[in-house]
Amino acid sequence: MAAQGYVQTSLIWVAYAVAVVLAFIAASVTTFIWQTPRDRSAIVSTVAIISLTALLATVLLLPVDIALVSSTTSTALGVKKDWATPGRIRSILLTLKIVYYSLYSFDALLCLLVIPFSYFWYEEYDEVEEQEGNQTFGSRLWGAFKYTIAFVLLVVIIFLVGFFVPAAGTRGGGKHLDLDFFKRLLDENHGEKALTFGVGLLMTLGTLLYLLYTGAGLALFPVSFIKSAPSISAPQLSENTASQLEQNRERQRQLEMRNAGRSDGMPAKDRRELDALAREERTLVRRERLAAEAQGEGKGFVVRAWTKICAVFRPLKLVGGILLIVLTLIIWVSMLITGIDKAANSVCKEHCGYILAHINVFQPINWLFVQTAKAFPIDYILMALLILLFFSASISGVATIGIRFLWLRIFQIRKGRTAPQALLMATVMLALITLGINYAVAMMVAPQYASYGTQTFCDLPPHHPDQQPDCSGRPEAIKPCSEWVDAHSRSLQACTPTVMSTFLNRVTLNWPVFGAIDFWAQFAFLAVFLVVFLTSLFRAPRLNLSELDEEAEADEEEGLLASTGRRFGATWQDITGRVKGGSDGAGAGAGAGAERNGSGSGV
């Protein structure tokens, strides 16, 4: 039986290692796709890839945490498995704690030191000074380090405050709570207290970013799937543009020939018309280039094949977008139910971050995870996909809103057009948002499942003090684990909380101000989601080709939107590479409209 336990836990860690490798590949592809090619920097690319990989590794550790603690308990009997001895459980929790603390510390180091240093290192580069020999490696290194000193002092201050300032929980805020669960949360050394303060502070800052960027992104991400198919195909756009360009140039030739022999020059009216035709010609040339790039002209076989594959799967993206909308609405309802339940029925209210004893109202997401747990390992896969959905929504939100200070846009995040400074700042924002996502998933989306997984306990007294209780004939006595029943002497042996939930509860109990801000910020998140979702859903598409021309002038390729029927027609033409016979090219070109693709809609 002991060997079985080792095999099960080893398989979980192997699956996590594979997920981290895939995260590294995804981070590398994402970095090279989003950053601008002409301003690429080796150190910026390396730091961005490592940071994104660390962030994905952090968010993907929660399913591993849940899987490991759940594997120690027999759900059907409500008792620990034979191999799950107290020593073995302590070893599992210690390993998880080491990995968690290492990742959190590494994320904080990247966010507060490495990324700022990389930012200033890139800003210190002066091509002219380097060519003239006035800028050396040492001077550039000192210039970057000089500005990074402020962040070093910030890290030291945060650590000292957390190390020396007494936590609120130790000053008597939780003395009225006669729960072993809370007593264990307060049992920590000064190093752990300093870490919980630092992570709690960063988590609160990340929650403020999370409610804006993730709230908007979660609403726009599914809509971007539905609106990703163009209203006019690339072959048809190319044909229409070529026809309009030919007419434009013919009209310019007519004007030039008509005024070729005039001694007084071209009349003002003809000059204005010729200037307008010249501007229109430049616009049509840019549009023609975009159509050629959309068809993969001048590209390799792989790029052309990928273009065809994307066209084939456009209908599936439409269906996937509809399913994602349904899922996000269920998540929104689940978070609202949990928030109201915690605000009304928390065992300690603001003193411990609104920890809930047990769920009092039916919660769809939590119920879904409990039910899918019967078919291992579907629930863990769904949890990983749920976390990736929040992370992808955060990226969508950052790309849509951009990096702003209040209403002023500092940087724009666009595919192939993201400056290195913007890429580093977006990485810092995602690092902070990741902490907010961890809190939201563990405390709001599926609180009971994220805290104890599928663990249950037998609420019957054992026949002998050294034996486990027996509920083999009493299934009604088997109950799910929660914080409240954890204080019960019988559940204390069967219920093991996840390391993530313990850590978050420790932060909110020791520093209640962090818990209160993080909790009430979830309602602001729900409000942002609702406003953006309704706006993007009911806002009528703006059919105007001038938007496409503006994007082309800025070298930003965006998709074209229109009705569902025309999207399917455009999809087929992109697959075949031909325009449907009998179509009126000029009429289609005049009537077709464009709107910005995906996540930009509705904001």
Image (cartoon, helix red, strand yellow):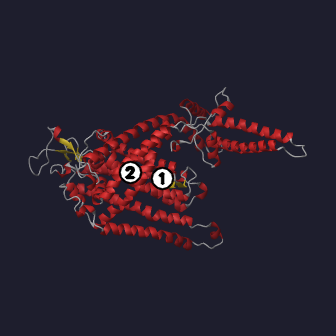
Instruction: Choose between 276 and 467: the one closer to the eye.
Output: 276
The reply to whether residue 57 is in sight is no
Q: Residue 126's quadrant in the figure?
A: bottom right
SS at badge 1: helix
**Looking at the image, is 42 positioned above or below residue 1?**
below
Q: Which residue is mark 2?
A: 437
Q: Is residue 463 left or right of residue 475?
A: left
Horizontal and vertical percent position of residue 502: 28, 55
Query: For the residue carrying disc 2, how many other residues have a C-alpha within 10 Å: few (<14), some (14-19), or many (20+)?
Result: many
Q: What x and y, as percent, mark residue 275?
A: 76, 45
**Comes first in the chain, label 2 or label 1:** 1
Disc ID at residue 332: none
**At x 55% / y 58%, what residue is drawn?**
420
Looking at the rendered structure, the kind of residue marked 1 is Ala
Nearest to the observer: residue 94 or residue 190: 190
Label 2, secondary structure: give it: helix
**Residues marked 2 and 1 touching at CB (< 8 Å):** no
Q: Which image quadrant is residue 86 in?
A: bottom left
Q: Is residue 52 left or right of residue 338?
A: right
* 108 lies left or right of 286: left
| Residue at mark 1 | 27
Q: Observer-nearest residue: 194 or 105?
A: 194
Residue located at (49% from left, 51% from top): 398
Residue 523: image x %, image y %?
36, 47
The Cα atoms of the two marked residues, 2 and 1, are separated by 18 Å
Q: Amino acid at mark 2?
A: Ile
